[in-house]
Amino acid sequence: MTLNITQTKTILVCDDEAHIRHIVAAKLRETGFTVVEARDGVQGAELAKVHVPALIITDLQMPGGSGIDMAVALKLRPETASTPVLMLTARGYILDNAQLAKTNIVEVIAKPFGVRQLLERVKHVLSGGASTQAA
């Protein structure tokens, strides 16, 4: 029997750019995931308390709470301490090993990115194939 990784999986999508957030969320929903949307890291951290997502996709730089601040805070909470994070970032922005060690960021994906590429990374991470790397 093949496991359907989308079955009952909730993904938190956090980005201050509404068009990116909506496109990513729509494609994830089309694939069968439940999606919760946040406009910044503060709202994302609050929603993660309520929904406890299986995966978080977040932008790095956002007004009102960065993705890295949210990822650090979520790693400190028992209920989200092991939740993997896919970090979206402007091309050329590099997270150092010290920053990554404080989070559950498993991959850094440069903007612009293809939605198909992102969906492949989501499925890969949720199937247990996570690795910390820049894409």
Image (cartoon, rainbow, N blue to C red):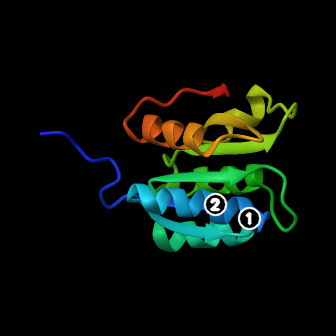
Report whether residue 40 is seen: no
Q: For residue 89, say whether it is visible.
A: yes
Which residue is tagged 1? 19
Instruction: Judge by depth and name the residue closer to the eye, 15 or 47.
Output: 15
CB within 8 Å, label 2 to label 1: yes
State the residue at coordinates (50%, 74%).
50
**Residue at image location 70% in from the left, 57% down from the top:** 70
Q: Tell me the SS state at disc 1.
A: helix
Q: Which residue is mark 2?
A: 23
Nearer to us in this view, 101 or 31:
31
Pinpoint residue 105: horizontal percent, then vertical percent. 63, 39
Q: Position of residue 48 (x, y in %)?
A: 55, 66
Figure quadrant of residue 134: top right
Q: Where is residue 7 shown, x and y percent of the image?
A: 30, 57
Farthest-out residue, left: 1
Q: Residues within 10 Å of mark 1 (few under 14, many from 20)?
A: few
Name which quarter of the figure residue 18 lies in: bottom right
Q: Secondary structure at mark 2?
A: helix
